Image (tube, rainbow, N blue to C red):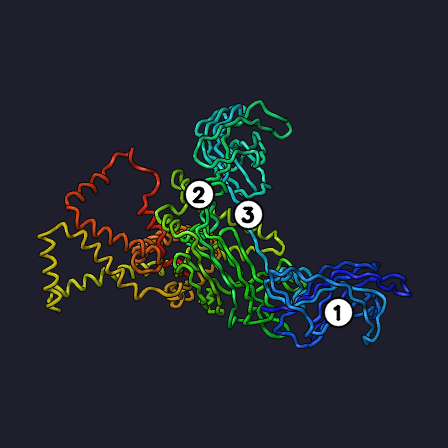
């Protein structure tokens, strides 16, 4: 998209006001109906503004550009100091990578443009595109009605997620812990806090002044480390009363960073007691920052990054993802403005550590962004998420009370894209509301996945999705859920401190913060995903029934013939199976999916959902119902049902991955599998079946010394296959 740029650098030798003897100058750039103003300076005849104005070429309705220099007055009308006029036909065009156009000094003219007046202004005027370096920091004519701090939120920005670490604190033991009640030994536990994260050890089973725990506590920390680890040793003084026996505060940057599972040295620390200084007793700790894990801040079903925290463990990128966020069509009006409803839309894309935000197009239900962004791809079995939002922080009074409304979201799994092919797609923007599913418009995208190393991509398909520490020393399900929630909160807080901020409601929506919550609709959708998987088995059983009933005599005779051959030559069973799968994969190539999938309302069971189920899905957690008993039971039911829902979804995912082996949804994975099937068929044809069975049995019954804790290549390949969870709303 083309823009007219006007760079206002500075002015000199401006005439002072004859009454006040001073000059409070500012510059006004006028192009037809659009006006842009710089800030004014108090009592300065040689001001410097260094500001750029951008006017969309599509909306230019004037043949001249006027640059006015004025003197701001508090009471009466601003004084006119002079102007510079440019003819649109004489404006030069600049195309990067040309160097920026050098600004020049221009003498100011009087109102009629007949003579020169005192003073000069330094300007540069050129026609350029969005690729211009000045574009991101320019004042846009589209945002002329935005005031105050809101003007910062209309510009496009790139954000980087904070670098997250897992902090592992192993609390071993403590010595000389005394409670206020000297009559009996204390019951001791340790409370640890990092920022807003609070964890406790179990109460030591034995009453003693030297308690022993040897318990791991896990936290999420972000660089730069602003929080501290605060440990308090506490004694049970009653059923609901605890007393502090000692306290310890440690900066996080003092802890060792480890890259693997090597042991970390433990240390004794002195405890402090309020008002008593350093105690004789201490606490024995083993703490480290884990660099070998990937800190999960998003669901593993839609993961966009799997690299470990420590940069030295990163591999080379295997591809490049280019995304063009073109436009949106038919957006639904969101908020009232001047007696009507309108939408101020912007788009956010998240992949890996990099978040991008397009500029906000004001008061437009069919905005055009035409912005392009690039990401390095370290693993093709990842998902990019794009969300469209209405900017709620533009008015003078919006402040912190304003919220950016959700318009819709799109997810694209990179492994489903053909290499080096440019896709231009229009995706529906669907959002679930208490009244039901609603189409909010369409998002038009262009994207391409470029392969840098096909050998590395093929190599990745046989390796685990996450770093090896997740498999050698795995976390429990509860720890994963808790740590992901903490990581998401930290990312939301840090991105909310950027300028302009990426607000919490945006980050939570992009990271699927509520994906684990109970929903009758989602549970039904997952159930019917499983049912659809068994439809193939049911169809097979019906076909066998038809064979038995001789409905098609030719088919039945062929099945009898095949059965007799396999009985006579049992070594042909396996190669025939692999050969058939190879032929089915080749046959399905014709009906392969040509375009990446989008949100499917039918699959998500969003079209047939009833109002009562939606009311339950949009209920708060904990529930807002007043009765205490109902509240406790209802929350417990939702928590348990949420886990069941996840298990059902995982079962459906495994079955859909089996389908993906031959469906060409991931073209590289299917290619690898059918090539493997062909090779396996050939090998099994030429190798006696007894040898195959013997080797398989020996491999299966091999000694534990010859087994690895890491998942096998077939398991890794299977886990990387795409499922239909990407299309779940």
Dot 2, how many residues are within 10 Å of its Cα: few (below 14), some (14-19), or many (20+)?
some
As drawn, 237 above or below 674: above
**Could you tell me which secondary element the residue under label 3 belongs to?**
loop
C-alpha distance separating marks 3 and 1: 43 Å
Disc 3 target residue = 162
Q: Earlier in the sequence, mark 2 or mark 3?
A: 3
Disc 2 target residue = 479
C-alpha distance separating marks 2 and 1: 61 Å
Q: Position of residue 352 (x, y in %)?
A: 49, 52
Q: Locate the C terminus by quadrant.
A: bottom left
Describe residue 677's horizontal placement relative to residue 37 as left or right: left
Disc 1 target residue = 67
Judging depth in this view, the residue of 659 and 310 nearest the camera is 310
Dot 1, how many residues are within 10 Å of its Cα: few (below 14), some (14-19), or many (20+)?
many
**Could you tell me which secondary element the residue under label 1 belongs to?**
strand
Describe residue 54's horizontal placement relative to residue 188 as left or right: right
Q: Nearer the viewer, mark 2 or mark 1?
A: 1
Q: Earlier in the sequence, mark 3 or mark 1?
A: 1
Dot 3, how many residues are within 10 Å of its Cα: few (below 14), some (14-19), or many (20+)?
some
Tag of residue 485: none
Q: Locate the N terminus by quadrant.
A: bottom right
């Amino acid at each position: 998209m083309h823009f007219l740029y006007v760079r206002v650098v500075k002015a000199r030798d401006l005439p002072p006001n004859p009454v006040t003897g001073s000059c409070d100058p500012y510059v006004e750039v006028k192009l037809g109906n659009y006006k842009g103003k710089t800030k004014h300076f108090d009592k300065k005849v040689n001001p410097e503004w260094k500001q750029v104005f951008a006017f969309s070429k599509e909306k230019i309705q004037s043949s001249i550009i006027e640059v006015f220099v004025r003197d701001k007055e508090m009471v009466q009308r601003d004084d006119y100091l002079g102007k510079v006029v440019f003819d649109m036909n004489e404006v030069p065009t600049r195309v990067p990578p040309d160097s920026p156009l050098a600004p020049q000094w221009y003498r100011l003219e009087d109102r009629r443009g007949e003579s020169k007046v005192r003073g000069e202004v330094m300007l540069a005027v050129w026609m350029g595109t969005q690729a211009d370096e000045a574009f991101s920091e320019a004042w846009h004519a589209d945002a002329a009605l935005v005031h105050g701090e809101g003007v910062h939120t209309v510009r496009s920005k790139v954000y980087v997620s904070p670098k997250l670490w897992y902090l592992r604190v192993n609390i071993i033991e403590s010595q000389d812990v005394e409670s206020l009640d000297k009559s009996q030994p204390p019951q001791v536990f340790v409370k640890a806090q990092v920022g807003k994260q609070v964890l406790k050890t179990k109460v030591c089973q034995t009453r003693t002044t030297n308690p022993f725990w040897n318990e791991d506590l896990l936290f999420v920390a972000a660089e730069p480390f602003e929080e501290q680890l605060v440990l308090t040793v506490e004694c049970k003084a009653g059923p609901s009363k605890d007393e502090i026996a000692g306290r310890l505060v440690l900066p996080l940057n003092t802890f060792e960073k480890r890259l693997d599972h090597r042991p970390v040295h433990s240390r004794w620390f002195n405890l402090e007691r309020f008002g008593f200084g350093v105690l004789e007793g201490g606490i024995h700790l083993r703490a480290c920052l884990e660099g070998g894990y990937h800190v999960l801040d998003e669901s593993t079903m839609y993961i966009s990054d799997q690299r470990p925290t420590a940069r030295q463990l990163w591999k080379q990128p295997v591809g490049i993802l280019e995304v063009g966020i073109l436009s949106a069509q038919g957006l639904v009006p969101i908020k009232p403005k001047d007696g009507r409803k309108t939408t101020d839309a912007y788009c956010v894309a998240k992949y890996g550590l990099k978040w991008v935000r397009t500029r906000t197009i004001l008061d437009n239900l069919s905005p055009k962004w035409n912005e392009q962004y690039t990401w390095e791809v370290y693993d093709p079995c990842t998902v990019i998420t794009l969300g469209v939002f209405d900017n709620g922080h533009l008015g003078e009074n919006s402040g912190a009370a304003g919220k950016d409304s959700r318009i819709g979201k799109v997810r694209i799994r990179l492994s489903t894209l053909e290499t080096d092919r440019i896709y231009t797609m229009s995706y529906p923007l669907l959002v679930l509301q208490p009244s039901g599913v609603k189409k909010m418009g369409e998002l038009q995208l262009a994207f391409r996945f470029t392969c840098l190393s096909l050998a590395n991509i093929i190599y990745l398909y046989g390796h685990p999705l996450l770093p090896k520490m997740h498999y050698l020393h795995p976390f429990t399900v509860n720890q994963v859920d808790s740590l992901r929630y903490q990581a998401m909160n930290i990312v939301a807080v840090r991105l909310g401190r950027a300028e302009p901020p990426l607000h919490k409601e945006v980050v939570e929506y992009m990271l699927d913060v509520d994906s684990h919550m109970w929903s009758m609709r989602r549970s039904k959708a997952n159930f019917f995903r499983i049912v659809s998987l068994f439809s193939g088995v049911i169809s097979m059983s019906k076909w066998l029934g038809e064979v038995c009933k001789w409905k098609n005599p030719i088919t039945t005779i062929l099945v009898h013939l095949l059965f007799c051959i396999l009985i006579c030559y049992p070594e042909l069973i396996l190669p025939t199976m692999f050969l058939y799968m190879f032929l089915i994969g080749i046959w399905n190539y014709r009906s392969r999916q040509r375009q990446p999938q989008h949100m499917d309302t039918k699959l998500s069971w969003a079209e047939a959902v009833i109002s009562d189920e939606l009311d339950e899905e949009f209920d708060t957690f904990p529930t807002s119902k007043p009765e205490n008993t109902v509240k406790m039971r209802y929350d417990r039911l939702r928590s348990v049902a949420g886990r069941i829902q996840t298990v059902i979804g995982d079962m459906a995912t495994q079955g859909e991955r089996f389908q993906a082996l031959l469906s060409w949804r991931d073209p590289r994975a299917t290619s690898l599998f059918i090539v493997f099937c062909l090779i396996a068929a050939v090998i099994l044809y030429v190798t006696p079946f007894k040898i195959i069975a013997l080797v398989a049995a020996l491999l299966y019954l091999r000694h534990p010394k010859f087994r690895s804790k890491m998942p096998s290549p077939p398991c890794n390949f299977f886990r990387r296959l795409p499922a239909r969870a990407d299309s779940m709303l």
